[in-house]
Image (cartoon, grey):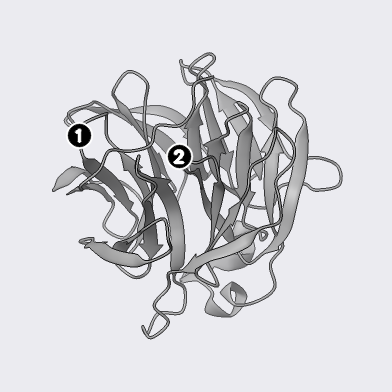
Amino acid sequence: MIFVEGLEHPESVMRLSDGGWLISEVGQESGRLIRVSASGKERSVFAQIGRPNGILQDPRDGCIWVAETLEPSLVRIRPDGSVAETISGNSECPFLWPNDMALGPDGAIYLTDSGIRVSDLITKDGPDPEIWEGQMKGKLFRIDPVSKRVDCLDQGFYFANGIAFAPDGKLYISESVTGHIYRYEFTDRLVVSSRELFVSVTDTSGPCRVVGPDGITFDTKGNLYVAMFGQGHVATVYPNGEIHRTIVTRGSCPTDVVFGGDGSKRLYIAEYQRGRVEIAEVQGDGFTGYDH
């Protein structure tokens, strides 16, 4: 089922607290955030921004945090679409490609940084496979939304991408180049234990070289859903790491996955290639995170 189409390279999709939706587009000329009604029939431009990637709604005030990739920064946008503030990392670890975000049990923002600048990877002809398979300096950051303190918690990723907390409190990150999904034991507001490999999800037998896991999300039972960019499906993974089924998308480049409202049993999938958000019927409900 198609929820909305005619989008220009959608990267992320997010359900708002009022039941509507927000979608980030990375157009050729300029990026923007599109607000879509709950039905998908009405849309409007919420904000113009350079090249928005991940999006997150702040539960404290309804503002939207945006991972901006052209001028690498984390941007907070007010409910009226105006820019409230911009964070560019810290003096020792400036952002290079802020990618995706998750709100932690402690109320902090956890951000992946892919470790390369957009202009180095993406040319007018598309992503450069040689750069894709080269050295990257991906990182995991924690940002305190009140004090604005930025801490680098881990580094050394090959294109860190999707990020999500599971119902059991563990933190998961997708690494696009290798196809790995890593996880961490989350212990307190500043300490994340050493990462461990959870599963590898990429099919390396395909002809395309620029492929890998993108956005990720969990259902209430701890099953992981992974948007597989360049491979045309969403991988679903049991808590024990077994890949038990896939959801085929109409385009080959799904970039993000998010559940609808409680009880909907619907997964909304941003698909970059054909410019749409698709809906898949699934067995479970989405894990909605933590009360803050």
Front-most of residues 216 and 250: 216
Judged from the image, the secondary structure of the residue bearing numbered disc 2 is: loop
Q: Position of residue 286 (x, y in %)?
A: 33, 38
Q: Amino acid at mark 1?
A: Ser
Query: Is 197 situated left or right of 268 in this image?
Result: right
Q: Residues within 10 Å of mark 1 (few under 14, many from 20)?
A: some
Q: Residue at x 22, y 41 (%)?
A: 266
Front-most of residues 136 and 171: 171
Which residue occupies the extreme left position in the image?
Answer: 1
Query: Is 84 situated left or right of 208 in this image?
Result: right
Q: Which one is earlier in the sequence, the residue at label 2 or at label 1?
A: 2
Front-most of residues 80 and 239: 239
Q: Residue at x 21, y 31 (%)?
A: 263
The CA distance from mark 2 to mark 1 is: 18 Å
Query: Is 267 situated left or right of 57 in this image?
Result: left
Q: Residues within 10 Å of mark 2 (few under 14, many from 20)?
A: some
Q: Amino acid at mark 2?
A: Pro
Q: Is residue 124 visible?
A: no
Query: Is 115 situated left or right of 60 in this image?
Result: right
Q: Which mark is residue 156?
A: none
Q: Position of residue 253 (x, y in %)?
A: 34, 62
Q: Is residue 7 visible?
A: yes
Give the quadrant of residue 118: bottom right
- Residue under numbered circle 1: 264
- Residue under numbered circle 2: 167
Q: Position of residue 51 (x, y in %)?
A: 52, 45
Give the quadrant of residue 285: top left
